Image (spheres, rainbow, N blue to C red):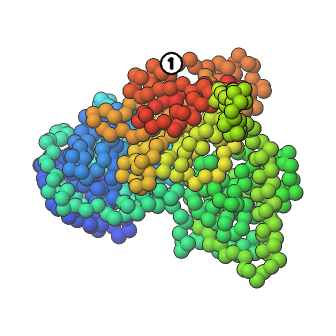
Amino acid sequence: MPDRHADPEPPHSQRPAGGDASAVSTPVPASLPRTGNPATDFSLDFLAQLVQRGVTDLVVCPGSRSQALSLVAAELERVGAVRLHVRIDERSAGFFALGLAAETGRAVPVITTSGTAVANLLPAMLEAFHATVPLVAVTADRPEELLGIGANQATTQPGIFGPNVPHEAVQAPVGAPDEAPLAERLAIRAADTRGPLHLNLAFRDPLSVAVPELDEWAAAAAPDDRAAADHDRAATGQGDAPTDAADTFDIEAADWPRTLVIAGAAAGPEAEKVAHEGGWPLIAEATSGSRYGRNLVLAYRQLLGATSPRPDLRDAIERVLVFGHPTLSREIPQLIARDDVHAVVVGPTGGEPYNPAHAVAAHVDAVRVHPVPPADADARTESRAWLREWVLASRALVEADAEQTPAPDIEASRSSDTAVRGRFAKQELAVARTKVDRRMLAEAVWSATWPHDRLVLGASTLIRSLDAHVAGKPIRVHANRGLAGIDGTIATTLGVAVGSQLGGPVSAQGGVTRALIGDLTLLHDASSLLVGQGGEWAPRVQLIVGNDGGGTIFDDLEVARTAAVEAHTRVLYTPTRVDLEALATAYGWSYCRAETRADLQGALVSREHERILIDVPLPRG
């Protein structure tokens, strides 16, 4: 029999230590029925082992070559072994699976047919690599005799996602005895992956037969307990760093004065914990999951910038500890690039090491902080003064920048004088009728979101406005900051929503998932609005769209000052005029237009609609 693998030793195959597939053996608790059809039997073995390894969700796109996998997935859903999510658009399916994996911390396979269906997964796979998300592309392929001869829907699929995505190509099954252990090894690899993985499975005719009922198997099968542990870890914010890691960096806080802790995207609560233990100021981006606590410094852009009101603090920084992937300001990479700053990056920051200007001194798995001893009075005094100066400086800037909304005059509302009550009503009406701007929108969305909710931030001007103005709050925030593109944001949001509301922590199952996005981000991923088809459960989602008619993020870049106005508008701002109400209605979503503060606040707290598009007109400037 020919070698099972199209590439016997692909550069990313990462075979298990110890030799062949049969060396890894964890038998399925109940025997799987056999059909005599190689494609169906291999699909049964592979997907059943995924279930055994803790995979709880499968995303399927319709296709002929992948039909055996899809039909087995449907049977596994029928017997309650998995949750099945069907999407007709592979690009959207990839990002849906990405959001689901990011929320749950578990690998999520997405099954497609061959050809361009595979290529449509590329944007999500790239984001998964750069953000270290366990997204598994399970792509069906033509058998070897149909490759390279111009056969329909056949191309070179192994390696299609580039050198950064591990892949494994498997020849079409023929019913050989070694195929069950091979399917098991593939399932183990898929379930245990920490980043993206591509499994390319060839099938030849006949592509499927009737799938046998799996009730008996499902009754005996018990998924691996790791599934629950993975979700518990993910629900806390990408997991606490292991204190017993092989590359744990011990820090005596007394020897690390004048230190800052920086938390970028997906840093999780470990950054806040370390800042608290060390007594250090914490700079936490809104996407970090660690934007809370008494050490939080909100006005970090102003304090670190070239025109800082406290250059003495900025220039006194000696060390920084970086968690996650900072992407929302220029000041942070500029700080790390300084010759007089010693930067240490802690834990994973994505597929590539975070290293601005190649200035990072060390990358470590985790840190263990030893607080300043109570007996070291001088060090404790210095540490407290350092933290106090940063927090107070930030507080002063935040208070100076705060929007002055008149507080309600309660006494006036109770006055027996009708003229006084009239003035009170007029004042309240004026506040309610205030037109929404970007800052008001960002602050309102943040204020309406609580720990049992989820917030997804699109790549637009709004994410920076939110990061610049909102207060600290321990909420779970998602954003595709690996490559910071606008693609797939709605699909990602729906994946996050399903992951948190359907089988997630009990505290999150009653929450709502909100996405704050721009109008171009909405239009780019409009097809992902198609949810709840075929009786599939659909989550509670609010899509809040800052509608300024185009890409205003380019208005803040240098190009806006150098390009001709007409050219800038045509090719960068790209003005759009779309009837968003008609779009929402076409896909079965509710719609409301929120032009004022009262409109917006009412829409955000309403539970009248399961899925709603909240259209918020914004001025371009």
Name the residue at 54% across, 45% down: 449
Residue 155 seen in this snapshot: no
Secondary structure beneath dot 1 equals: loop
Name, please, the residue furthest toward the front: 416
Left or right of residue 320, residue 599 in this image: left
Q: Residues within 10 Å of mark 1 (few under 14, many from 20)?
A: few
The C terminus lies in which quarter of the figure? top right
* Above or below, 35 relative to 123: below
* Above or below, 486 relative to 482: above
- Front-lying residue, 196 or 72: 72
Name the residue at 73% across, 61% down: 281
The N terminus lies in which quarter of the figure? bottom left
Name the residue at 30% across, 44% down: 84
Residue 359 seen in this snapshot: yes
Amino acid on which disc 1 is placed: Asp
Quarter occupied by residue 187? bottom left
- Front-lying residue, 38 or 544: 544
Residue for badge 1: 579
- Front-lying residue, 193 or 93: 93
- Front-lying residue, 375 or 410: 410
| Image spot of residue 540 (x, y percent) | 42, 39
